[in-house]
Image (cartoon, rainbow, N blue to C red):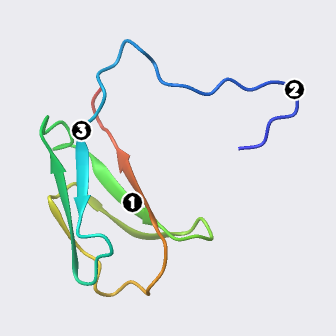
């Protein structure tokens, strides 16, 4: 994020925090997602490499096969369809 004049970063205090666990870290074959609220059932997941390229896109599932991804650092993005 680049700001030229002023930026405000923060969390909307009216929203509940999300309890989300990703394991194992690092992952070689499968990445597991655990969310106690189970609020992602109608969501999509994107895995993004360090260049900002989406390398995997799928419907939400508790286990993602990452065995075909190269070793590296990735960002996991959950795109909620509701709320």
Quadrant of the rendered image containing residue 41? top left
Give the mark count.
3
Badge 2 element:
loop
Residue 76 is situated, as x and y percent measured from the top left of the image, at 40, 58
**Is 46 positioned to the left or the right of 63 in the image?**
right
Q: Residue at x 81, y 24 (%)?
A: 6
Q: Which mark is residue 76?
A: none
Badge 3 element:
loop
What separation in Å lies between label 2 and label 1 (alpha carbons)? 31 Å
Query: First in sequence: mark 2 or mark 1?
Result: 2
The residue identified by callout 3 is 19
Vertical arrangement, residue 32 with respect to residue 8, above or below: below
Query: First in sequence: mark 1 or mark 3?
Result: 3
- Disc 1 versus disc 3: nearer the observer: 3
Q: Given the current orientation, which residue lies at the most extreme right position?
A: 4
Vertical arrangement, residue 61 with respect to residue 9, above or below: below
How would you rate the neighbour count of disc 2 (Cα within 10 Å): few for under 14, some for 14-19, many for 20 or more? Answer: few
Q: Residue at x 22, y 54 (%)?
A: 60
**Is 55 positioned to the left or the right of 32 in the image?**
right
Q: Which mark is residue 5?
A: 2
* Label 3–label 2 contact, CB within 8 A: no
- Disc 2 versus disc 1: nearer the observer: 2
What separation in Å lies between label 3 and label 2 (alpha carbons)? 33 Å
Query: First in sequence: mark 3 or mark 2?
Result: 2
What separation in Å lies between label 1 and label 3 (alpha carbons)? 19 Å
Q: Quadrant of the C terminus?
A: top left
Residue situated in front as seen by the camera: 22 or 57: 22
Badge 1 element:
strand
Q: Residue at x 56, y 69 (%)?
A: 53
The residue identified by callout 1 is 46
Residue 7 is situated, as x and y percent measured from the top left of the image, at 74, 26
Q: Given the current orientation, which residue lies at the most extreme front position?
A: 25
């Amino acid at each position: 994020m680049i700001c030229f004049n002023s930026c405000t970063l923060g969390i909307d205090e009216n929203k509940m925090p999300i309890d989300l666990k990703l394991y194992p870290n690092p992952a070689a074959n499968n990445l597991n997602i655990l969310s106690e609220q189970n609020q992602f059932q109608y969501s999509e997941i994107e895995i993004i490499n360090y260049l900002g390229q989406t390398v995997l896109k799928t419907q939400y599932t508790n286990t993602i096969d990452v065995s075909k991804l190269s070793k590296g650092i990735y960002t996991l993005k959950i795109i909620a369809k509701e709320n």
